[in-house]
Image (spheres, helix red, strand yellow):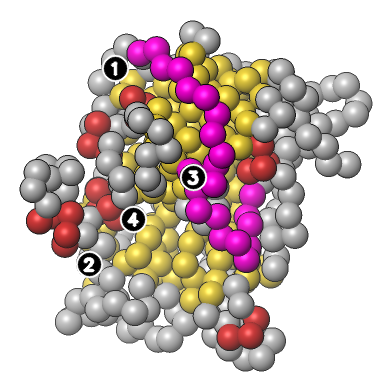
Amino acid sequence: MEHSTLPVGAICTLLVQTSEHSIQTRQCSKKRSSFDSVKKADENVNVTATMHHGSSGTDYLPPDNTVEMHFLAYAEDAIDEGWYGLGNRSYGIGLSETLLPDRGRYEGANYRVTLTFHGLEQDIETQIGSTSTTIELSCEVTSTTVDFLAEGNMRGYIPIHEFESTDNHPAVEWEPSDCHVVLQLDYDPGMSCTPSRIEQDPPLDPDLDYTTQLTPDIQIDYRGRVTGTATEQRFPKAIDHCLLFDDLAIVGLDPDSDGFDDPSFQYEKAQNLVAIDSTGQVAWVAEPATSYEGDRGYYYTLWRIDDSLFAKVRGLGKAGRMTVELNPETGERISTIS
């Protein structure tokens, strides 16, 4: 199938899903700006998804009519008054501040973001709460962006280049016509917490703490601890990031940090990616990423496409950085993408 750009004027629907209190959507107009000020891309490895526009005249989605992308993001410098860029080393979007959860409306707030493309409209009620948001918006595809609209007013966007294929990223195939998208935002206070933010007066988030209740069964303390229903894991390194994958919390340890003095987990160099199940037990430790020269790197960001898990690695000496696919059930490396 040949790659092509999206047709100007193609329409889809965007949804941001969670379960908090509803508010009315306010009007907001916004001119498009360069996404260079929204998302600081990794210049060495640009990891994006790909939209394919088929020539058969029929709409395409995978057999189950959904495509899912899960990634981590943080609110960067405001790109304009009342607007934030939510980006990281994988994907990035621009959103009106009014769409963000109440507690996470500040620079440096961390989020878990899920985009799910559907073949059918979801008809979800707008909800914006303290830690998560649900809102349905229409999306108008232009030559440079996919604009998120509410009653004709722009509320957010994602650049078209986020859907262009590169050598460093597997394609996500979906037909932009007659589809809908669910975007879920979950504010992660623990991943957002730093000593300077706790001491800031007035506080950015009055309830800011190092811990986040990821699921009803899993609590994470980013100073280096994950607690499940039966036990906990204490790490000698602090936790840099965490991605949920079904019932697993996949945590990336910061190799240059200090964690707990009485660790239950024995950390070894280059083994900084660990999956914890709902009971608190270690499900797997990711296979170390190794360059052709034998250098061992460490994982520094994660994302998910459908049932596939991807990660970026750095610290590989002359090989630089690379992107790999991991088996989400075992942590073994399936392939090297770059």
- Circle number at residue 40: none
* Magenta stretch, residue numbers: 26-48
Q: Residues within 10 Å of mark 3 (few under 14, many from 20)?
A: some
Q: Residue at x 26, y 27 (%)?
A: 129
Residue 107 location, x and y as percent? 31, 45
In 3D space, how far apart are the residues under numbered discs 4 and 3 (Cα atoms)?
Answer: 38 Å
Chain-order first, disc 2 or disc 4: 2
**Is 106 on the left-hand or right-hand side of 57?**
left
Q: In the structure shown, which secondary structural element does the residue marked by tag 2 occupy? A: loop
**Is 106 on the left-hand or right-hand side of 16?**
left
Q: Residue at x 34, y 79 (%)?
A: 256
Q: Residues within 10 Å of mark 2 (few under 14, many from 20)?
A: many
Q: Decide: is 74 above or below 11.
A: below
Residue 309 location, x and y as percent? 57, 57
Amino acid type at mark 3: Ser
**Does the magenta segment cover residue 44?**
yes
Q: Decide: is 29 above or below 325.
A: above
| Residue at the extreme right of the image, as rendered | 56
Q: Is residue 307 visible?
A: no
Amino acid type at mark 1: Ser
- Circle number at residue 278: 4
The residue indicated by pointer 1 is 22
- Circle number at residue 37: 3
